[in-house]
Amino acid sequence: MISRRSFLHTASVATGLTFVPKPLRSAEPAPSSDSVPLIDFHVHLDNSTIDKVLELSRERGVKFGIVEHAGTKENKYPVVLSNDAELKRYLAMLEGKPVFKGVQAEWIDWMGCFSPEVLGQLDYVLTDAMTMHGPAGQRQKLWEKGPDFSDKQSFMDRYADWHVEIMAKEPFDILGNTTWLPDALLPEYDALWTEPRMKKVIDAAVKYGVALEISSSYKLPRRPFLKMAKAAGVKFSFGSNGRYPKMGLLDYSVAMAKELGLKPADMFSPAPPGQKPFQRRKRE
C-alpha cells in the first residue's frame, strides 16, 4: 500500500521568496510576513514528538497547528484517533503548548466517533477530498493504486462535486490539499481544473464558511484558482502537510499571499468556543 506521505513533495525549494523569521517564544503570538500571520495549520507528529516539533517552530518562527488523523480504525495512519478517550489523551498532550489543537478528519463518518463536548475542545478541524466514493460506494484513496482515471472529464466532474458534497455535509474549518490531483492527472492540471469546476468549489467554500489551504508541499492551488477564490471572499490558511522535519516550510504559501496581497482579514482564524462549525451548523 502506498502511503499518502509518499506523495508529499519537499517544500524546501524556494519560489523566489526568502524570509528569515525571528525565533518564536512560547508566550508570543504567531509571527507575520508583511502582516499575514505565519501559521502552518497542517502539521503531523508522525515519527516525532511534540517537543521536537516545537523546537522547529521556534527555529523557523512559524506557529504550528497540529493535526492527528481522526476517524474510524479503517483509516490506516501512524495515529488514528477514534474515540473520546483517545482524543482526550491527544488534547492533554498539547495542553499548554504554543500550538493550535486540530485533527485531520477522515472520510465522512468521523463525527460519529466523538462526543460534541470533546470535539468542542479542538481549535479546528481540517479535512481533504483525497478519499472519495468508489464505483460501489466504498471509500477509495485516490493516491493509491486502483482508481480508474481513464475518463478524465467524468472523474473531474465527480471530483469537483465531491468537494462540494463534503463541505455541505461535514462540519469542518479548513479544506486541506485544495485542488490536489493524482499523479496520473497532474500534468493536465490547468486543463482539468476548468473555470466552472474551480468556481463550484470556491462557491461552496464561501457558502459553508470553509477556509482553503494554500499548500506549500504540493504548491497548490495554482494562481488562477487563488485569484478567483480571493475575489469571492474565501478565507485562506497556510499548510505544509509536514512530517518532521519538513513542517513550517511555507515558501509557496507566503509567495502566493504576497502576490495576492492577502491581509490578516483574508486568513483563517479558529472560531471561538460555541461557534465551531459543528456547533454552528447544529443551530442552523
Image (tube, rainbow, N blue to C red):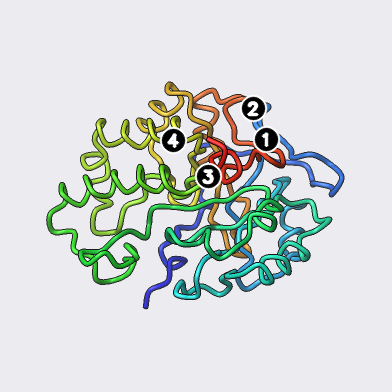
Q: In the displayed image of the protein, which residue is found farthest to the bottom?
A: 1
Mark 2 near mark 1, Cβ–Cβ under 8 Å?
yes
Q: Secondary structure at mark 1?
A: strand
Pointer 2 residue: 264
Q: Earlier in the sequence, mark 1 or mark 4?
A: 1
> Residue 174 — which label?
3
Cα separation between marks 1 and 3: 16 Å
Q: Amino acid at mark 1?
A: Pro
Q: Position of residue 221 (x, y in %)?
A: 40, 40
Cα separation between marks 2 and 1: 7 Å
Crowding near pointer 2: few (<14 within 10 Å), some, many (20+)? some
Q: Amino acid at mark 2?
A: Pro
140, 43: nearer the viewer: 140
Quarter-wise, where is residue 274 in the image? top right
Q: Amino acid at mark 3?
A: Ile
Pointer 1 residue: 37
Vertical order, 71 against 159 (above or below)? below
Q: Secondary structure at mark 4?
A: helix
Q: Amino acid at mark 4?
A: Ala
> Residue 205 — which label?
4
Vertical order, 89 against 260 (above or below)? below
**Left or right: residue 87 compared with residue 172:** right
Q: Earlier in the sequence, mark 3 or mark 4?
A: 3
Q: Secondary structure at mark 2?
A: helix
Crowding near pointer 3: few (<14 within 10 Å), some, many (20+)? many
Residue at screen point 60% across, 39% down: 18
